[in-house]
Image (cartoon, helix red, strand yellow):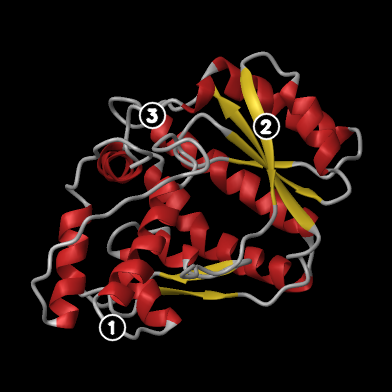
Amino acid sequence: LDGAPADAGRVTPFLDLVRDHAGIATRAKVTSRNEFPTASGLASSASGFAALAVAATRAAGLAMGPRELSILARQGSGSAARSIFGGFVRMHAGEKVDGSDAYAEPIPTPLVGKVRMVIAIVGGGAPKTHGSRDAMEHSAETSPLYAGWLAAVPRDLVEAEAAIAAGDVAALGTIAEANALAMHATAIASRPAIVYWQPATLALLAAVRELRARGLAAWATMDAGPHVKVLTTVDDADTVAAQLANVPGCSSTMISAPGGPVEVL
C-alpha cells in the first residue's frame, strides 16, 4: 500500500470471497496506491475496496454487473459499495443477514457538473488513531446519542435524495452538515470518548460558517477524521479553498469534482 508492506487482515478475507465466487484457490498479490492521505478519514478504504472488487473479480474471470460489484465491495468497506459508481449515490442498507440486498445505486442529478468539494487537510494527513469501523461499533455500544442520530437518518436520507434530484445544493449542504456534526457528537459522547477533531478542525468549521454568512456556497461535512470537506459550487470553489488554506493548522487544501465510476485501465 503506497509502496510499503500493509496489513492483509481485511484484504485476505475479501479475496477469499472472490475465490469462493470463482471456485478457484489462486493466490494474489495486491498493490494499491492512493493520491491522498491514507487511513486518515478521507475514505481511502472505500476507494481501495471498490478498486479491489473490480480488479479481483476481473482477474478471477468473473463477470459482475455494477450492483453485484457494489454488494461485494460493501463486504470490504461499507462505503466502497457507493464508490463503484460515479456522481451521487444512494446506499440501500438491506435487511438480509447475508447482505445480498445491501447495495448502492446512482441518483440522477444536475449537480454533478455544478458542485465541487474542497478538502481541508489537518495534521498533514497523518493516520487516525481510531478506525472508522471500530469507532462506529464503539459508539453504537456506548454513546447515549447514538439512538437519536440513527433516528434522524431516514428523514435526512429522504430530504438529501430529494435535494440531489432537484439540484438544490443549499438544501443538500444543510442536511449533510447537520448529519456530519451529529455523527461526531455521537462519537464524542461515547464512553470513553472518540474525538477526531483537532483545534484546526474547529477553526475550519468556524471559517466555513463565516464564508456562508458572506454569501458563499459553503457547507461542511466530515468523515471519521479531523479533516473538513466543504461542499461548494464551481464558481466559489477557488475562493473557499484559498480562504481555508489560511486557517492556522490547515496543512493544505484540494478541490475535487464528482468522480466517475470505477474502471479497469
Q: Which residue matches tag 2?
A: 253
- Residue 131 shows in the view: yes
Residue 215's spot in the image, x, y percent? 91, 39
Q: Is residue 250 left or right of residue 63?
A: right
Residue 99 location, quadrant:
bottom left
Q: Residue at x 17, y 47 (%)?
A: 9
Q: Is residue 88 left or right of residue 28?
A: right
Residue 61 to residue 178: above or below: below
Q: Residue 128 — which label?
A: 3
Residue 237 to residue 67: above or below: above
Mark 2–mark 1 distance (CA, rounded to whole Å): 39 Å
Q: Which residue matches tag 1?
A: 62
Residue 43 to residue 195: above or below: below
Residue 216 location, quadrant:
top right
Instruction: Name the kind of residue labelled 3 in the image.
Output: Lys
Q: Of helix, strand and loop, which one carries label 3?
A: loop
Q: Residue at x 46, y 38 (%)?
A: 41
Instruction: Name the kind of residue labelled 1 in the image.
Output: Leu
> Which of labels 2 and 1 is toward the front?
1
Q: Is residue 256 left or right of residue 18?
A: right
> Which of labels 1 and 3 is toward the front?
1
